[in-house]
Amino acid sequence: MDIDPRTTLLDLLREDLHMTGTKKGCDHGQCGACTVLVNGRRINSCLTLAVMHDGDHVTTIEGLAKGADLHPMQAAFIEHDGLQCGYCTPGQICSAVALLDEVKAGAPSFVTSNLSVLEGVDLTDEEIKERMSGNICRCGAYPGIVAAVRAVHEGNTG
């Protein structure tokens, strides 16, 4: 694509590629509504320029499902009422998918109790909340979000 070098990844996705699942919330990197996965890592797409990701693998909420089959995290958010209005949900789900990969890789968070044992981080509710803290839900669906992440982590998805 030929784009203005000042275009954010968020604006490229929404305005040029018409992938409107990724939401523009604060446009300052504070709410997480624009979270997408770039090469498997979560980022706020409003804070990065699209040209910086030439050749990268960008996954939005639209890319998580396999045809009609929802990603396990998408299904868990529905099953556990991890949403109300749904505006923040795409960013929440992308962040939750990356969170599980980070835990699997042994990446600690601020609340990880034992930093000497980086393999097998215990995914407590406190860990989930800390790791999801960059994604704000104005409706307060946090208990359902935590339950959805836990269900996928434990393999309990319908």
Image: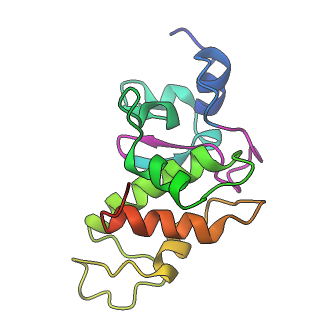
Q: Is residue 40 above or below residue 16?
A: below
Total tally of numbered discs in the picture: 0
Determine if the magenta segment contains residue 38: yes
Q: Is residue 61 left or right of residue 29?
A: left
Determine if the magenta segment contains residue 41: no
Inspect this view and state whether residue 29 appears. yes
Extreme residue in the top direction: 2
Q: Position of residue 99 (x, y in %)?
A: 42, 61
Q: Residue at x 69, y 60 (%)?
A: 136
- Which residue occupies the foreground of this view, 42 or 154? 154
Extreme residue in the front direction: 158
- Which residue occupies the foreground of this view, 83 or 62? 83
Q: Position of residue 73 (x, y in %)?
A: 43, 52
Q: Is residue 138 left or right of residue 49?
A: right
Instruction: Report the magenta stretch's main SS.
Output: loop
Q: Position of residue 155 (x, y in %)?
A: 30, 63
Q: Residue at x 66, y 47 (%)?
A: 33
Per the rendered image, the range of residues in magenta is 23-40
Quarter residue 39 falls in: top left
Q: Residue at x 56, y 64 (%)?
A: 145
Q: Position of residue 148 (x, y in %)?
A: 48, 63
Quarter residue 54 falls in: top left
Q: Is residue 138 above or below residue 8?
A: below
Q: Residue at x 35, y 31 (%)?
A: 66
